[in-house]
Image (cartoon, helix red, strand yellow):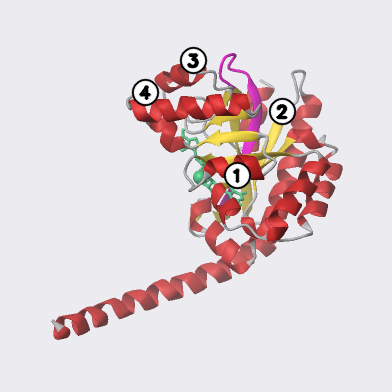
Amino acid sequence: AKKHGKDRFEVFEPAMQEAFQAHIALEADLRRAVVRHEFELRYQPIVHLRTGEITGVEALIRWMHPERGIVPPMDFIPLAEETGMIVPIGEWVLREATTRVAEWNARRDGPPLTVSVNVSAVQLEQAALIQVVESALQAADMRPDRLVLELTESLLVDHRPATLERLGALKALGVRLAIDDFGTGYSSLAYLRRFPVDIIKIDKSFVDDVVDEPTAAALTHGIIQLGRALELSTIAEGIEHAGQLTSLAGGNCELGQGYYFAEPLTGAAISDLLFP
Ligand code: C2E
Ligand code: CA
Ligand code: CA
Ligand code: CA
């Protein structure tokens, strides 16, 4: 058995080294990407479920890698967080998203769109985040309540004492806060008491099974009712089929997003959609 273990170790070592080298290469690439601005935003429409009207968009980052093509956020956001590069990247996302959506709102006849931006825990650790948000709003000439900052539950789990204070300062600016992936963390309900949130985003895993699984349906509709009781907006994530829409709208879920309505779209595609 010992010999077997040794053999296995020898088999794994080159693989680990390869993974390590790939990690180092990716980090160097990402540093270059920050300097050369290799990122783009996609915008996924958020829709009022009863009327079908677009009420806002969620900004989702893409890395346009010169050799690898489009790199999805899951493949580089963790590294960006580890290395602190998420701070300049996140600042760019805030500026770009607010600028773009403010442009659309200026041209638009209908009610102004909201823009939702994902904010990572590392960004929230920076005291400067407040000024970054404030200056992005000013530069875009956007009303603060049109900006939604999406925070994941994991961010709220291992929160530092400064987190609550920082969220309070963001609220004082007038921006709105959403809990992303709601229901997937350990004590989702506790956060609703502790943090000044305005919006609950019901995780896709509930929405996936809302038609076929009575338990998922009961939980989803329970979350919607909880949201209503607390006077929070609810957004269902990852709606892919008409059946899910029927169930969610029937349960009085206010808003939703998902491939059923639209994938994350380029800014140009959103423009075409808004100004045909
Ligand atoms: P998220 O915030 O939960 O975003 C929703 C993800 O679900 C997006 O993946 C979106 O493209 C995808 N999605 C939307 N509708 C559907 C659907 O109907 N079906 C399916 N299968 N998927 C759907 P994406 O764009 O790959 O982003 C993944 C995650 O990366 C995001 O999850 C968010 O946590 C993170 N992320 C994206 N952009 C940023 C950013 O600018 N900053 C930070 N810190 N994180 C970001
Ligand atoms: Ca999100
Ligand atoms: Ca989510
Ligand atoms: Ca997620």
Q: Nearer the viewer, mark 3 or mark 1?
A: 1
Q: Is residue 128 above or below residue 266?
A: below
Instruction: Estimate the spatial distance between the alpha carbons at disc 3 and disc 1, rounded to whole Å.
Output: 27 Å
Tell me the amino acid under the disc marked 3.
Answer: Gly
- Whichever of callouts 1 and 2 sits on the residue coming sooner in the sequence is 2
Percent across and percent down for residue 45 are 60, 30
* Numbered badge on residue 191: 1
Tell me the amino acid under the disc marked 2.
Answer: Leu
**Residue furthest to the left:** 1
Residue at the spot of label 2? 113
Tell me the amino acid under the disc marked 1.
Answer: Tyr
Whether residues under marks 1 and 2 lie with C-beta atoms below 8 angstroms apart, the answer is: no
Question: Magenta residues?
Answer: 48-63
Q: Residues within 10 Å of mark 1 (few under 14, many from 20)?
A: some
* Numbered badge on residue 250: 3
Percent across and percent down for residue 257 are 54, 29
Tell me the amino acid under the disc marked 4.
Answer: Val
Percent across and percent down for residue 198 are 68, 34
Residue at the spot of label 4? 211
Q: Secondary structure at mark 4?
A: loop
Could you tell whether 210 is left or right of 162 in the image? left
Instruction: Estimate the spatial distance between the alpha carbons at disc 1 and disc 2, rounded to whole Å.
Output: 27 Å
Q: Nearer the viewer, residue 184 or 150?
A: 184
Q: Nearer the viewer, mark 1 or mark 2?
A: 1
Q: Secondary structure at mark 2?
A: loop
Q: Nearer the viewer, mark 4 or mark 1?
A: 1
Instruction: Estimate the spatial distance between the alpha carbons at disc 4 and disc 1, rounded to whole Å.
Output: 27 Å
Instruction: Estimate the spatial distance between the alpha carbons at disc 2 and disc 4, rounded to whole Å.
Output: 30 Å
Q: Main secondary structure of the magenta part?
A: strand
Tell me which residue sits at (39%, 30%) in the image.
216
Tell me which residue sits at (51%, 67%) in the image.
26
